Image: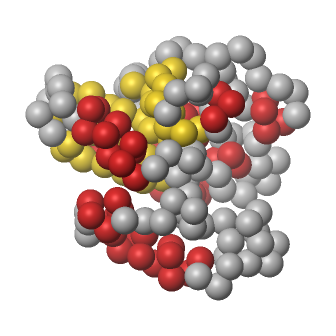
Amino acid sequence: MSLVAAAVVPAAPALIPGLGGAADPLAEVREVARSAVADAVAEGGTDPYVVVVVSGVEASLLGGRTVRRWAVGAPSGAGRFLGTGAPDRALPGGLEIGRMLLPEGREAELLGVAQDAGAQECLTAGRHQTEGADTVLIVVADGSATRTEKAPGHLDPRAEGFDAGLARALAEVDGPALADLDPERA
């Protein structure tokens, strides 16, 4: 079996309705992301195929592992972003976003990968996911966080080139280029 389709969508918490405030600044981005996910899921063809939502996760949520699965019915972790906390076993933000973007009624496997995992660990996890049934992969991730002075990672002049290379590798489905990305810069 194999990877039959994929979509990459942003990991911005404000994509979760209500987290961006009353103005809902990312409503349009949310709809574009929802459409990309729906298109990828539709490319899966007829069942059986598996939809896997994957996102980078803080090490503290992984219990010492590199990869962890979350239950499809896990409680929302949106409270982390509202300062109200999240219940035990709540979804990390990226997986919450991916689950929210799925077409109604479509379930998925929810897979968190350590944010500091190396390329080989990610490749191994990806190969393992596509060994069974045909797979549609939904990746919830961002490019660099260093494009401006006010960015979370401050300004890094290499960020624009990094993001351009990442976009090219994704658009061309260039596995070797993706595997060669510098994890520190990513």
Residue at the spot x=36%, y=48% of the render?
120
Q: Could you say where residue 83 lies in the image, as x and y percent from the top left?
A: 88, 34
Left or right of 23 in this view: 161: left
Q: Could you say where residue 75 lies in the image, as x and y percent from the top left?
A: 64, 17
Q: Vertical placement of 85 versus 75: above or below?
A: below
Q: Could you say where residue 58 lies in the image, as x and y percent from the top left?
A: 65, 38
Residue at the spot x=47%, y=31% of the render?
67
Q: Quadrant of the N terminus?
A: top left
Residue at the spot x=59%, y=33% of the render?
96
The colour scheme applied to this rendered structure is: secondary structure
Left or right of 133 in this view: 62: right
Left or right of 138 in this view: 153: right
Q: Could you say where residue 180 lies in the image, as x and y percent from the top left?
A: 37, 65
Q: Is residue 133 visible?
A: yes
Residue at the spot x=50%, y=76% of the render?
162
Nearest the eye: 112 or 40: 112
Residue at the extreme right? 83
The tally of labels here is: 0
Q: Quadrant of residue 95?
A: top right
Q: Quadrant of residue 4?
A: top left
Q: Quadrant of residue 23?
A: bottom right
Nearest the eye: 36 or 159: 159
Q: Quadrant of the C terminus?
A: bottom right
Nearest the eye: 182 or 68: 182
Nearest the eye: 21 or 82: 82
Q: Vertical placement of 91 versus 14: above or below?
A: above
Left or right of 42 in this view: 149: right
Q: Is residue 104 visible?
A: no
